[in-house]
């Protein structure tokens, strides 16, 4: 059997047991075979191998041919197997949501939480982008930008104000973009990349990835109005300062007018923050 540790791990994440994954991979590589031959080849008890094969059959990963005096097993195309799992998951997902709604529970956590799954980080970030009601502040390096870019749509930008500090150098349509260009330090010189999403002064996500952005090093999700307000407030002023600083030290004409124009673009954010601060201070 070829080196298939990665595939075996992925199959186990999809719900297969270790033996089921081993049997399935052997069948993928060798095609139609009897359970006895498979057991001999992988070095597992015959009874256990047949049990794994029957389980794989129920899960839709293999098919069984009993038309002759021997029972043969073979895999179905992996795309069909995965499609079956996806459909079953989608059906179960809807049923779970319906059952949870029947419980009449309030799912609105309050606090500071550490997220340890790369997929969950992006799910949370995209959810924040899609549910913001007033303003989004986003500070994003190139790798995570690939995962959230398509959600910064024209429609979303019509609904909320999106301010994006972008390190990739490319223009993102429909958002107020702060180009994070530092001639003394390139993001490629750093040991990691980050993603910061601040939603409506009430929710925050701060994530740090490895150098190429493929692994999550650390992430904190904050659902606390006071802490999120402080982060939102500091980031808004930092964005504003970054743009003003760029105009002060470049060689363009009419610097004063351009700086005034930049500051004007942030007036609605500052007005919004003052309103939200009053709301926070009024809370008991």
Image (cartoon, rainbow, N blue to C red):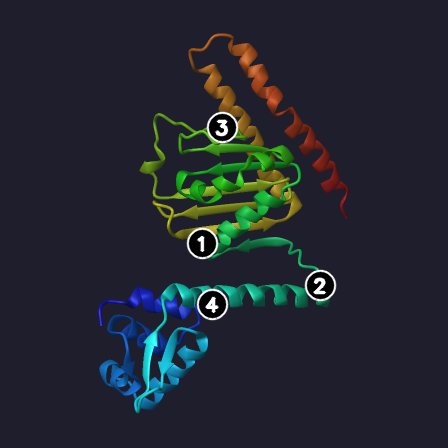
- Residue at position x 38%, y 52% in the image: 215
In the picture as drawn, the residue positioned furthest to the front comes out as 67
Residue 105's tag is: 2
Between residue 117 and residue 248, name the one nearer to us.
117
Residue to which mark 1 is pinned = 118
In the picture as drawn, the residue positioned furthest to the top comes out as 253
Q: Residues within 10 Å of mark 4 (few under 14, many from 20)?
A: some
Residue to which mark 3 is pinned = 178
Per the model, the C-alpha gap separating discs 3 and 1 is 26 Å
In the rendered image, residue 278, in percent from the top left (x then y), is placed at 74, 36
Mark 1: secondary structure: helix
Between residue 75 and residue 190, name the one nearer to us.
75
In the rendered image, residue 151, in percent from the top left (x then y), is placed at 53, 42
Task: Judge from the rendering whether residue 57 lies leftward or rightward of residue 200; answer left or right.
Answer: left
Report the label total. Answer: 4
Per the model, the C-alpha gap separating discs 4 and 3 is 44 Å
Comes first in the chain, label 3 or label 1: 1
Comes first in the chain, label 2 or label 1: 2
Residue 223's tag is: none
- Residue at position x 54%, y 30% in the image: 174
Residue to which mark 4 is pinned = 84
């Amino acid at each position: 059997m070829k080196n298939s540790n990665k595939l075996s791990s992925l199959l186990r994440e999809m719900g297969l047991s270790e033996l089921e994954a081993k049997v399935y991979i052997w069948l993928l590589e060798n095609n139609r075979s009897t359970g006895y031959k498979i057991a001999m080849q992988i070095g597992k008890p015959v009874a256990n191998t047949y049990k794994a094969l029957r389980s794989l059959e129920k899960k839709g990963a293999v098919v069984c041919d009993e038309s002759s005096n021997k029972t043969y097993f073979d895999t179905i195309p992996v795309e069909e197997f995965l499609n079956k799992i996806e459909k079953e998951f989608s059906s179960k997902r809807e049923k779970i949501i319906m059952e949870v709604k029947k419980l009449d529970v309030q799912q609105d956590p309050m606090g500071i939480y550490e997220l340890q799954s790369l997929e969950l980080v992006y799910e949370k970030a995209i959810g924040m982008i899609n549910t913001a009601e007033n303003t989004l502040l986003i500070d994003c390096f190139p790798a995570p930008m690939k995962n959230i870019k398509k959600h910064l749509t024209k429609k979303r930008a019509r609904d909320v104000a999106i301010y994006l500090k972008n390190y990739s150098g490319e223009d993102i349509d429909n958002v107020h973009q702060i180009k994070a260009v530092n001639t003394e330090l390139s993001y490629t010189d750093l040991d990691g990349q980050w993603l910061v999403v601040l939603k409506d002064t009430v929710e925050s996500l701060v994530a740090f990835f490895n150098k190429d952005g493929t692994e999550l090093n650390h992430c904190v999700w904050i659902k606390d109005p006071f802490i999120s307000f402080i982060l939102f407030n500091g980031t808004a002023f930092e964005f504003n300062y970054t743009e003003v600083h760029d105009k002060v030290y470049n060689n363009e004409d009419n610097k004063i007018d351009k700086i005034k124009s930049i500051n004007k673009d942030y007036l609605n954010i500052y007005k919004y923050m003052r309103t939200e601060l009053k709301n926070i201070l009024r809370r008991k």
